[in-house]
Image (tube, rainbow, N blue to C red):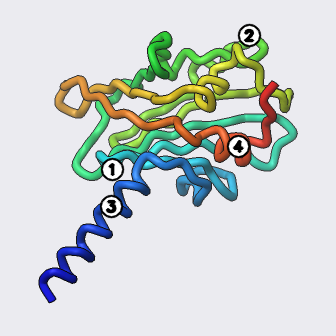
Amino acid sequence: MLRRFIAFIGVCVLSFSAFADSWRVGAPPANASASSAALVTNDAGDTLYLWRQAPSQRYEIFAELHLGTGKAFSHRLPKYQIDQGKITRIDRIGGSTGTSVEGWASVSDRRAIWKLRDSDDRILSEGEGLYSWISGDRIRFVYFDDVGREITTEFSLSGSSLSITKIAGVQIK
């Protein structure tokens, strides 16, 4: 009986590990006006969401980072880096046409939200920021917690392209 219980616990742990860092389509965050989102949860319990604003003829894509239990943001927005690329401040992301969407970002104690793309073009080009989200391997966020410590959290981008293109309605050029 004890061996079966230990085996059951092992299967549960392996199942959870396989689920963590695996992109999927699921329910969006409560504040999103979308029916679904691409999302991933890492081993630390943090969740990253992407969704397309609906209803809209534009391709407005939003991202939202939710921190796991017991964690909190300071009132500063995080930065992120995909693979070894440049560090991106989420309050300074430019639109696909060179227009700025600067300023469309907010942070609360457990979540940060920002507009990642705002375009009327369905085709996603290699130079756009969202392109890195579907072609990269890992994304790393750096933020300050509520007592001023610098914290890092990472997510795999492996398999993100299918989930992200599905919810965003974009095609890769």
In space, the residues marked 1 and 4 are separated at their CA atoms by: 23 Å
Q: Are marks 1 and 4 in contact (CB under 8 Å)?
A: no
Amino acid at pointer 1: Gly
Mark sitting on residue 14: 3
Q: Which element type, helix, strand or loop, lies under badge 1?
A: loop
Whether residue 36 sits left or right of residue 103 in the image: it is right
In space, the residues marked 2 and 4 are separated at their CA atoms by: 20 Å
- Specify few, some or many for label 1: CA neighbours under 10 Å numbering under 14, 14-19, or 20 or more: some
Q: Foreground residue, 64 or 10?
A: 10
| Residue at the image point whose x is 18% and y is 75% from the top | 6
Image quadrant in which you'd find residue 35: bottom right
Q: Going from the N terminus, do you reach mark 3 or mark 4 first?
A: 3
- Specify few, some or many for label 3: CA neighbours under 10 Å numbering under 14, 14-19, or 20 or more: few
In space, the residues marked 2 and 1 are separated at their CA atoms by: 35 Å
- Name the residue carrying label 2: 98
Q: Going from the N terminus, do you reach mark 2 or mark 1 first?
A: 1
Q: Which residue lies furthest to the bottom in this view?
A: 1
x, y percent for residue 100: 67, 14
x, y percent for residue 90: 51, 22
Whether residue 106 sits left or right of residue 146 in the image: it is right
In space, the residues marked 3 and 4 are separated at their CA atoms by: 32 Å
Q: Going from the N terminus, do you reach mark 1 or mark 4 first?
A: 1
- Name the residue carrying label 1: 45
x, y percent for residue 108: 39, 39
- Name the residue carrying label 4: 52
